[in-house]
Image: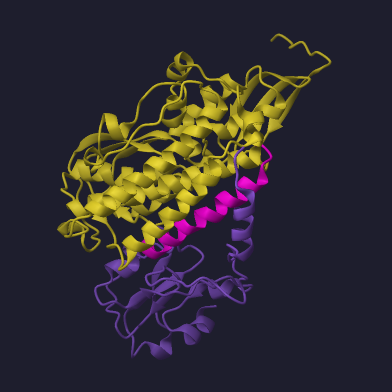
Amino acid sequence: MEMESISENEYELFFGPAHPGSGNFAVRLKVDGERILSARSDPGYLHRGFEKLMEYRLPIQNAVLSDRICVLEPLNWNLIHAEAVDELMGIDTPERAKYIKVIMAELSRIQSHIIWYGVISMGTGFNTGFKIAFGYRDYILDLFEMITGGRVYPAGYICPGGVRRDLPEGAKEKILKVLEKMEEMLEFEKLENPFHLDRMENVGILKLKDAIRLGATGPILRASGMKTDVRKDEPYEVYDKLDFEVPVRKEGDAYARYWIGLEEIQQSINIVKQALNNLPDGDFIAKEFKKPKLAIKIPEGEVYVRNEVARGEAGIYMASDGGTKPYRVKIRGPSFLHMIPVLEHLLKGAEIADVPAIYWSLNVCPADLDR
Amino acid sequence: MKVDVIPKLIKNLFSKPMTVRFPHESIPIPDGYRGEHAYNIDKCISCGLCAKICPNRAIEMVEMPKEYRDKYPKKYPKIDLGKCCFCGLCQDICPKEAIKLTKNFFLSTFDSSTTIKYPLPEKTSKEEG
């Protein structure tokens, strides 16, 4: 074994896992003075083993479990799990359920992008932005509390066959009122802020070629100049009936990624408004799932579904051997590739002070990386 | 930076703050909130479906203590609130509406034995504990 040569200025620095600016995730930085020579991601701090847990549970119980895959956008993960089971079992969900699913998924996306804005602001030292973002996020949590019964965890609200409850009375007016507040917040966020410009412009530039090579998806890839969105490329639920745009930027730096997030909030608000206007009457769940049942057999087969969640492209592979429980579940979280290859690539050559700006501009979620 | 500072300032001076002073006032809790369970033993038919669907296995079917066994001879659900994730599947699957989730979310306690809900509250907890 060869000994590593040690220079006087070189040392190893841990960013996380118990660091206020990293969130249950560690990056080992090899630094020379202020400059980072190499970075190594150190995942595993938050591993809970969902893939194995799901093999021992019924689909309706897995719907509850799927909340926990990503704490910041549980409804999107509910949706993708429900879609996988629906496709495997060949269930036709009612039209109303599809619209409610889209409304809830988009509200969840808005809420997640608001957190993104908040943590970017916190990472770059703009604490007012953090407080405003989390204050406005609570209006959406109030909606979730009214519709699903829980503020953060909807407990499998979007379940196989549809949704567990219908929208309560007066929900449409309340949602529209909250969307008005979101637009008010966007107005504030879209102001050109010197804090954000100084800390993020030309920092952590991800070129399109590298982004594709390293497997970036979603807002990160769009900020590097590629127009891609699963909602447009391979529409699921009722996205093909809704009119929305895919924001794209060419710069590929942290500021472009941050700006993509803000533009996506605006698009999501438009989607929710359209879906609310077109919301049809009818059942909110397929007949065979109206009451949860224990002995529903999943037909033999395998399926892979992909969705656009707030952080990028998520996928669930599910295989069944004909029993009541899935034989194998594989979860593809978008943060896995953003936090290991992309982050390591961007941190190389950066300065220590830029680490939070680069880290949070990738819209990371350690929970769905470690799953 | 283009901000109309003075109109915004005046608007903010006279608008209500975002936060509420919690112990004195609180935001209203909507119907259908998933809080602590309310269990009605007289409606229960001891089918055990709630114990089977519970994702966290927080519900266990237990026998009643001897003095109540004449009146309640079957097994009844014992709920461990420490394991519960408040998903409400037990409420949905119950054929007789014996379990319902209430709006009560004040569940923090200094005494760990109070996190377990017995079928008959005060009477059975001493027997087993």
Residue A300, given in percent of the width and then of the height, sits at: 18, 39
Magenta stretch bounds: A124-151
Q: Quarter holding the N terminus of chain B?
A: top right
Identify which residue, B94 or A313, lies in the foreground. Answer: A313
Left of A12 or right of it: where is A257? Answer: left
The picture places residue A202, in percent across and down from the top left corner, at 60, 22
Residue A16 versus residue A297 in the image, above or below: above
Q: Quadrant of residue A18?
A: top right
**Residue B9, image x and y in percent?**
64, 56
Residue drawn at x 47%, y 83% is B121
In the displayed image of the protein, which residue is found farthest to the right? Answer: A8
* Dominant secondary-structure state across the stretch colored magenta: helix
The scheme the figure's colours follow is: by chain
Is A120 drawn above or below residue B32 in the view shown? above
Expressed as whole percent of the image width and height from the top left, the position of residue A111 reads 46, 48
Give me the chain that's purple: B
Q: Is residue A126 magenta?
A: yes
> Is residue A164 in the magenta section?
no
Q: State the residue at coordinates (15%, 48%).
A: A92
Residue B98 image-quadrant placement: bottom left
**In the image, is A272 to the left or to the right of A303?**
right
Q: Tell me which residue sits at (41%, 68%) in the image.
A: B34
Q: Tell me how many marks there are.
A: 0
Residue in the foreground of this view, choosing between A151 and A183? A183
Q: Chain A appears in which tint?
A: yellow
